[in-house]
Image (tube, rainbow, N blue to C red):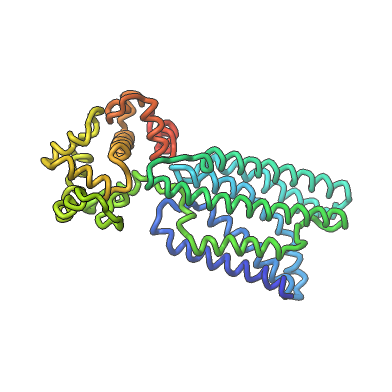
Amino acid sequence: MILNLIVLITGLIGFATVGLILKNNKLNSAMNVYIILIIITVSIRYFLMGLVHFTEDESFKSFCSRYSNFALIIIPLFYLYFKKLSDTDKRFQKKELLHFIFPVSFFIFILYLNSLKINNERTIYVLGAIFFLYAVYYTIGYYKLLKRNIWQENNTIKVVKKQNVLNKKWTYFLFFAILFLAVRLIGSLFLEINFGRNIKGFSYQWISALIWLIVLFKILSSPEILYGYDMLHKKIDENRNRNLFLNSVWNINPKIQINNAQHLQLKEKIAPLVLTYMESIEKISMTDKIFRDPTITMTDLANKLNAPKSHISYLFKYHSTISFSEYKKVIRIQDAITLIEEDYLKENTLDYLSKKVGFPSYNTFFTSFKEISGSSPNEFCKSDKRAI
């Protein structure tokens, strides 16, 4: 009774989670739609399986048993979720439908066998083996995708690195949760095959429900994990109408202790000018494009601002989350992205673009682009549907 109630409650909490996600989705256009589909599918399954044990309606029980295998679509949904999590393009693509051909076909085939009442031992073993190979294939796919696109991502820029760490922890957690769910399901199918039952994976459903409850509570407590890589250039675009484009880079009131006597003296002089310096630096960065000069130094920046170099050095040391060299990279990549979105590559090459925005070589541009945007220049261009 209690174990069945856990399954039912899991379904209800899943519906509540979907409601909260959809309510807040308008706050983040980068929402990954596949996690919503996963939660809806799993929640419906748990809710119906929970209800089965609290009703005497045989037709309802038959319905739930007959259509439970449709939950097979969860397997490719997880793959597509992981893929979109590390992708700059969150939009749906028609080719993604190819992942659902097998689970839908498999589901229809099982319905056909049930309608013909074909339930011999050989058929059950064959279907069980096919499902096992299918699950293993996608699990390996999860691992390779996550390892390549998320787990091996190393970033030196603090504002991007923070998001990388968050994504790594979340995907490690979710991947191992999926493994536990798979082990439970395969064990359940093994028992059902041995005892000659219909292969539904219903045995010990409460174990999966508990695991899924943990996943749901993780999502509810940290909803930001759902959005994937919050690209720095998107933050800049979102803040264009504010005083500071890069408000995630600047820190007007840093909570740090200054022990250097010279810096303490500078603090008194610079404090009233901090915001002015930040706005001026961003203006000449974004509007005047001074960082297209590959040889520009902090001294050059200070001269253009008519400010002492010590003031600018102090600003980047205590009021910025990234160094001056990292700031140059961020601005240049943002400049490159803006040019790509303006169809600059229709008449120019990526190599020419890298020099245009101030990189000394294409290799440096390529590395910096992937580090900051989350994808290579070519991948970004494809997702943006611009010609190279």
Whether residue 342 can be seen here: no
- Up the image or down, 58 lies above or below 83; here it is below
Q: Position of residue 271 (x, y in %)?
A: 17, 55
Q: Residue at x 23, y 47 (%)?
A: 315
Quadrant housing residue 388: top left
Quadrant housing residue 63: bottom right
* Left/right of residue 195 with respect to residue 267 in the rendered view: right
* Left/right of residue 95 with respect to residue 75 in the rendered view: left
Q: Position of residue 199 (x, y in %)?
A: 79, 55
- Up the image or down, 210 lies above or below 269; here it is below
Q: Position of residue 369 (x, y in %)?
A: 38, 35
Which residue is at the front of the view, 316 or 275? 316
In the displayed image of the protein, which residue is found farthest to the left?
A: 306
Q: Residue at x 31, y 41 (%)?
A: 323
Which residue is at the front of the view, 360 or 380? 360
Q: Residue at x 74, y 75 (%)?
A: 1
